[in-house]
Image (cartoon, rainbow, N blue to C red):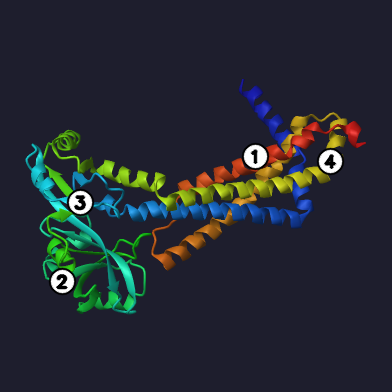
Amino acid sequence: MRDAKTGWLKEVSIVIRARTPLGWLQLRKDRTKLFTALAGIAFADILIFLQLGFQDALFKTNTQYPRRLKADLIMVSSQAKNFNQLFTFPRRRLLQARDIAGVYSADALYINSVTWRNPQSREKGSLSILGQNPDRPAFDLPEVNSQLEALKIPDTVLFDKAARGETADLIAQVEMGKAVTTEIGLRTVTIGGMFLLGASFADDGALITSDQNFLRFFPKREAGIISMGLITLEPGAQPEAVKQHLNAYLAGDVQVFTLEEYIAFETTYLQTNSAIGFIFTIGSFMGFVVGVVVVYQVLSSDVNSHMAEYATFKAMGYQDEYLLGVVFEEALILSVLGFFPSVAISIGLYQLTARATALAIAMPLSRTLWVLGATFVMCGLSGAIATRRLQAADPADIF
């Protein structure tokens, strides 16, 4: 049995080695056309890579604070859309939540955007500002939680050193222990420390401070009007059961999620309701269409220019399957040769974008494999379209 199997494999190997690589020979014959096709495929892949990279950066940066919340349950307004559009609700809902069995604590988180003046460049920019209870930190951020005492000092904030803008000198001064002051609105504040997270599409970065300092920066905002409630459960309490109890007990102006559900809520909004997310999806689809058109033009032109040769093969007895295999061989070669340069160029563009915008954009292996698969589909689809005339060709009509 083993000898028979080995003999069959040898025969297949001989056939593969003996087969003339017509697809590659035809592509290589016209090098100008070949490089044009590869450039078109690479461009299409780069476009897809960039759109997917920007979309992923949108999801990551706009959910980076939700993913680091330190709570078992999250309470937000029933009108909330995402972390940047939470709306507000009365803090008494947190007091009511403490009446529910299983709830250990319920703390307020204040969120807003502020205009600040960069102390280094003196230019104004937009930052998110988050006010938390310094005795029960809102975020699982060790850099922040090790500096909670500094937040208790009036008009003191922690600054995200990954924020966009010219901040190298500012960061160096703070890390050397020097006092750095700046302006938020009409108020002078002190940067008492640093943490590292990153900018988002909505803001250049973030500031974290205490709830009392937050209210000083927004004197017209009442302390009883909050952005988010962070609920910690007692040991052994079931988050899902407590969540359902809270949603049934509280008024309809708030909704309660588990932490995982809230992160999914944020991501779903960005995927389905965000205009930017929709634009990136359309951009990726258009890159795919561009690739299909480019490869189709190349393969169709190749089929037309070698129609007589294909007809000769048919007259010699070769079946359509063999001739179609030649075209699909060309499509496969184009997809592979056009893909790898696009990966290298896209990684370079990712790094350039990350430095220029402070966005978290990188090239995961999963995206590389996904785009490679899309490239095979793109070229295969183009090959299938380009072979329609070849299948209908009759040697008698050509000769």
- The residue carrying mark 1 is 381
- Image side of residue 165 versus residue 144, left or right: right
- The residue carrying mark 2 is 155
Q: Look at label 4 and name its amino acid.
A: Met
- Give the Cα distance between marks 4 and 2: 79 Å
> What residue sits 64% from the left and 27% below the top?
6
- Give the Cα distance between marks 1 and 3: 49 Å
Q: What number of labels is visible?
A: 4
Q: Quadrant of the C terminus?
A: top right
Q: Looking at the image, which is closer to me, 199 or 373?
A: 199
Q: Secondary structure at mark 3?
A: strand
Q: Secondary structure at mark 2?
A: loop
Q: Are marks 4 and 2 in contact (CB under 8 Å)?
A: no
> What residue sits 9% from the left and 38% below the top?
100
> What residue sits 22% from the left and 78% below the top?
180
Closer to the camera: disc 4 or disc 2?
A: 2
- Give the Cα distance between marks 1 and 4: 20 Å
- Give the Cα distance between marks 3 and 2: 22 Å
Q: Is residue 363 visible?
A: no
- Give the Cα distance between marks 2 and 1: 61 Å
- The residue carrying mark 4 is 307
Closer to the camera: disc 4 or disc 3?
A: 3
Q: Look at label 1 and name its amino acid.
A: Leu
Q: Is residue 99 visible?
A: yes
Furthest residue to the left? 99
Q: Of the two numbered discs 2 and 1 on the same chain, state the one appearing first in sequence.
A: 2
- Image side of residue 289 versus residue 66, left or right: right
Q: Of the two numbered discs 4 and 3 on the same chain, state the one appearing first in sequence.
A: 3
- The residue carrying mark 3 is 228
Q: Secondary structure at mark 4?
A: helix
Q: Look at label 3 and name its amino acid.
A: Met
